Amino acid sequence: MRALSIFALMSAAVTAQAADLTVTVLDRNGKPLADAVVLVDSSVPGPRPAPAMEANVSQEKLRFIPAVTVVGLNAKVSFNNLDTWDHHVILGVMGPGGVYVDPGLNTQFRLAGRLAGKAPASDSKVLSQPGPYLLACHIHSSMRGHVYVSDTPWAKLVGGADGKVLMQALPEGPARVRIWHPDQLIDGAPTAVQLAATGNAVTITTQIAPARKKRPAGDPYFGG
């Protein structure tokens, strides 16, 4: 009997397959939603991909680049100032509506402007709380950026114009998909999916209206 049980478990392990999931994220007008973070949760046993535990965010031409960075819990994020003038980094947990949850708990530091022939000023922080962080600069109020600390190993940024991401190596079975975006006002409800090894796709239409990016006044990189 014990041998049969072991054989059954081995057979189930052999037949179980990883599933892929294509997620298309749309705004409230049905258009592809760039800069959205897609997160997939699954409680089905199986291997998990390693999350990103290091990332770099640059301050360049009065922008945070990338504008949105996705990392795993307790990841180290390094900040570099590539401009020739000083910048601040204000780093804090972000709440609904794009504001800091508690400005008194924000981390703040200054990065000197880059000198010719020298390495850029840099600093790094370990982010131990899941969810979105807001980046800003005291000196240049138009600068905004975001870091999303994921509590699931399946997390990706929508980077293309088609609003799609491919989530790979998910276990077959039930899962749920969450969407986060810098311009959302409230958290949307998760979308339940049933994953199969033959390939899966889901389109999620959010209630998010992406804000138009304002040009900093007098910014030569924006042409006026």
Image (cartoon, rainbow, N blue to C red):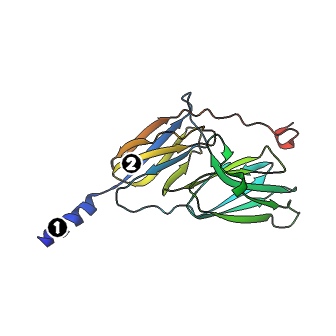
User: Left of 73 or right of it: where is 202?
Assistant: left
Question: What secondary structure is found at the residue carrying circle 1?
Answer: helix
Q: Which residue occupies 47% across, 42% down?
A: 23
- The residue closer to the viewer here, 218 or 20, is 218
Label 2: few (<14), some (14–19) or many (≥20) C-alpha neighbours in 10 Å: some
Question: In the orientation shown, which residue stands out farthest toward the top?
Answer: 29
- The residue closer to the viewer here, 126 or 67, is 126
User: Left of 102 or right of it: where is 29?
Assistant: left
Q: Which residue occupies 88% across, 39% down?
A: 218
Image quarter in which the N terminus is found? bottom left
Image mark for residue 5: 1
Label 1: few (<14), some (14–19) or many (≥20) C-alpha neighbours in 10 Å: few
Q: Which residue occupies 49% across, 49% down?
A: 39
User: Left of 81 or right of it: where is 34?
Assistant: left
Question: What amino acid is found at the position of numbered circle 1 in the picture?
Answer: Ser
Image quarter in which the C terminus is found? top right
Compute the Cα span from label 1 to label 2: 27 Å
Q: Quadrant of residue 180?
A: top right
Decide: is 197 above or below 74: above
User: Left of 38 or right of it: where is 120?
Assistant: right
Question: What secondary structure is found at the residue carrying circle 2?
Answer: strand
Count of numbered marks: 2
Question: In the orientation shown, which residue stands out farthest toward the left?
Answer: 1
Question: What amino acid is found at the position of numbered circle 2 in the picture?
Answer: Ala
Please give the residue where the numbered disc 2 appears in the rendered image. Answer: 175
Q: Quadrant of residue 53?
A: bottom right
Of the image marks 1 and 2, the number of the one nearer the N terminus: 1
Measured as percent of width and height from the top left, residue 190 is found at 45, 42
Measured as percent of width and height from the top left, residue 111 is found at 81, 61
Measured as percent of width and height from the top left, residue 82 is found at 80, 57
